[in-house]
Amino acid sequence: MRTELVTALKRKATRLLADVERTRRPIAITQHGLPSAYLVDVESWEALQRRLALFEGIARGERAYEEGRVLTHAQAQKKMSRWLK
């Protein structure tokens, strides 16, 4: 991953944004030698958000299972039939 100073972002924002869009590789922005932000293209960001939502759903399902909040197939079918009408 490429790293740029925040001052480079101020001076070359248009070029950096074009690079991110073209290469689809994020750029780390540092301030005072520490990571401050990442520039990421929109398509990659949206894909990351979709993956995160999927993983969160899986985690909720695992917690429900561990807590015993489960249904039989017949119970689930009955509950879902209300939504699928």
Image (cartoon, grey):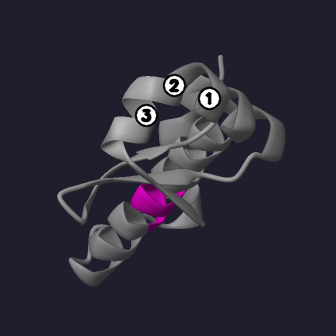
Q: Which amino acid does label 3 sit on?
A: Leu
Q: In this view, does 40 lie to the left or right of 67?
A: right
Residue on which disc 3 sits: 9
Q: In the structure shown, which secondary structural element does the residue marked by tag 2 occupy?
A: helix
Q: In the structure shown, which secondary structural element does the residue marked by tag 1 occupy?
A: helix
Q: What residue type is labelled 1?
A: Leu
Judging depth in this view, the residue of 26 and 44 nearest the camera is 26
Judging depth in this view, the residue of 20 and 57 nearest the camera is 20
Question: Which is closer to the viewer, label 3 or label 1?
Answer: 3
Tag count in the figure? Answer: 3
Residue 20 position (above or below residue 3)? above
Main SS class of the magenta portion in the image: helix
- The Cα–Cα distance between marks 2 and 3, rounded to whole angstroms, is 5 Å
Q: Which mark is residue 13?
A: 2
- Locate the C terminus and report the quarter of the image it occupies: top right
Q: In the structure shown, which secondary structural element does the residue marked by tag 3 occupy?
A: helix
Determine which quarter of the picture holds residue 2.
bottom right
Magenta residues, as a range? 54-58
Residue at 58% over, 63% down? 73
Residue on which disc 1 sits: 17
Single out the residue that lies furthest toward the right: 22
- The Cα–Cα distance between marks 2 and 1, rounded to whole angstroms, is 6 Å
Asked whether the residues under the numbered discs 2 and 3 touch, taking CB atoms below 8 Å apart as contact, a structural biologist would say yes
Residue 4 position (above or below residue 55)? above
- The Cα–Cα distance between marks 3 and 1, rounded to whole angstroms, is 9 Å
In reply to whether residue 57 is colored magenta, the answer given is yes
How far across and how far down the image is residue 66, in percent?
A: 28, 83
Q: In this view, does 59 lie to the left or right of 66?
A: right
Residue at 72% over, 37% down? 19
